């Protein structure tokens, strides 16, 4: 086990009660997968770009995940089910390290994130309806650069308005909003620890 895993296992265990919350309809859960791709030499965080076909957050960068369904026994089960549906990662490719604190979207959806160490496959099996492509943010880059304040133009009912958020660029895409809040938690847990 490498240092970042030990640090997260210790620190995320303090959030265990968050992962045990009773799931509610309207809540969402995501996975924050961290691992090394084939041919790569560094730890990377997997994110996805949403397609224009999904109901909300079209074209935005997110973590694999989605809304809780009554058939899900827990919020972690939601994150695992949605991750499999969106990118094809199975539970035997994952080691769950623990939950981060929930974050709220602009539409008042509560998102429950779970960090996982992942054995990335050679090829992902993407849901063509939900995922346009995958992106990989190097963990070391996140820890060196952190997130910066950004201003994002958002369209709503034909009008454009601007949102202030934290953000970081990855593969020519801006990660902002709830996904950036999740990354910021990860950054804060790890930034002061020696590697």
Image: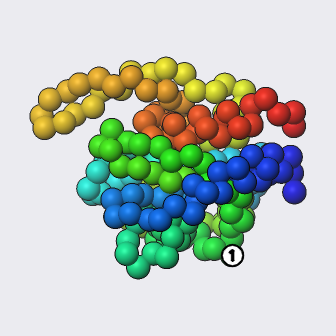
Is 133 situated above or below 61?
Answer: below
x and y, in percent, of residue 130 in the image = 37, 61
Crowd band around label 1 with a 10 angstrom C-alpha radius: few (<14), some (14–19), many (20+): few
Task: Please name the residue that numbered disc 1 is placed on.
Answer: 92
| Image position of 8 (left or right of 83) | right
Q: Residue furthest left?
A: 158
* Residue at position x 12%, y 34% in the image: 158
Query: Within the image, what quadrant is residue 129 found in?
Result: bottom left
Q: In this rendering, would 47 be left or right of 53? A: right
Q: How many marks?
A: 1
71 vs 194, left or right, is: left
Q: Quadrant of the N terminus?
A: bottom right
Q: Residue at x 29, y 51 (%)?
A: 56
Helix or strand or loop: what does disc 1 sit on?
helix
Can residue 145 be seen at all in this image of the molecule?
A: yes
Position in image of residue 182 (x %, y %): 55, 42
Can residue 84 be seen in the rendering of this structure? no
Q: Position of residue 122 (x, y in %)?
A: 66, 66
Q: Residue at x 56, y 46 (%)?
A: 101
Image quadrant for the C terminus? top right
The relative height of residue 74 versus residue 113 in the rendered view (above or below) is: below
Is 23 situated left or right of 42 in this image?
left
Q: Which is more toward the observer, 174 or 156?
A: 156
Query: Residue at point 69% right, 70% down?
Result: 93
Front residue (pair 34, 12) = 12
Colour scheme employed for the rendering of this structure:
rainbow
């Amino acid at each position: 086990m490498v240092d970042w895993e030990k640090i997260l296992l210790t620190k995320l265990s303090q959030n265990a009660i968050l992962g045990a919350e009773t799931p509610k309809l309207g809540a969402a859960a995501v996975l924050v997968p961290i691992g090394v791709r084939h041919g790569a030499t560094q730890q990377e965080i997997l994110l996805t770009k949403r397609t224009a076909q999904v109901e909300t957050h079209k074209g935005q960068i997110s973590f694999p995940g989605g809304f809780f369904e009554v058939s899900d026994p827990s919020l972690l089960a939601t994150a695992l089910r949605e991750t499999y549906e969106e990118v094809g990662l199975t539970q035997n490719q994952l080691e769950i390290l623990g939950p981060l604190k929930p974050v709220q979207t602009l539409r008042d959806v509560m998102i429950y994130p779970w960090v996982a160490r992942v054995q990335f496959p050679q090829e992902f099996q993407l849901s063509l309806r939900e995922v346009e492509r995958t992106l990989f943010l190097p963990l070391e880059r996140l820890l060196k650069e952190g997130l910066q304040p950004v201003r994002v133009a958002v369209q709503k009912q034909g009008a454009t308005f601007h949102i202030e958020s934290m953000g970081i660029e990855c593969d020519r895409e801006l990660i902002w909003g709830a996904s950036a809040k999740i990354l910021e938690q990860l950054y804060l847990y790890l930034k002061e620890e020696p590697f």
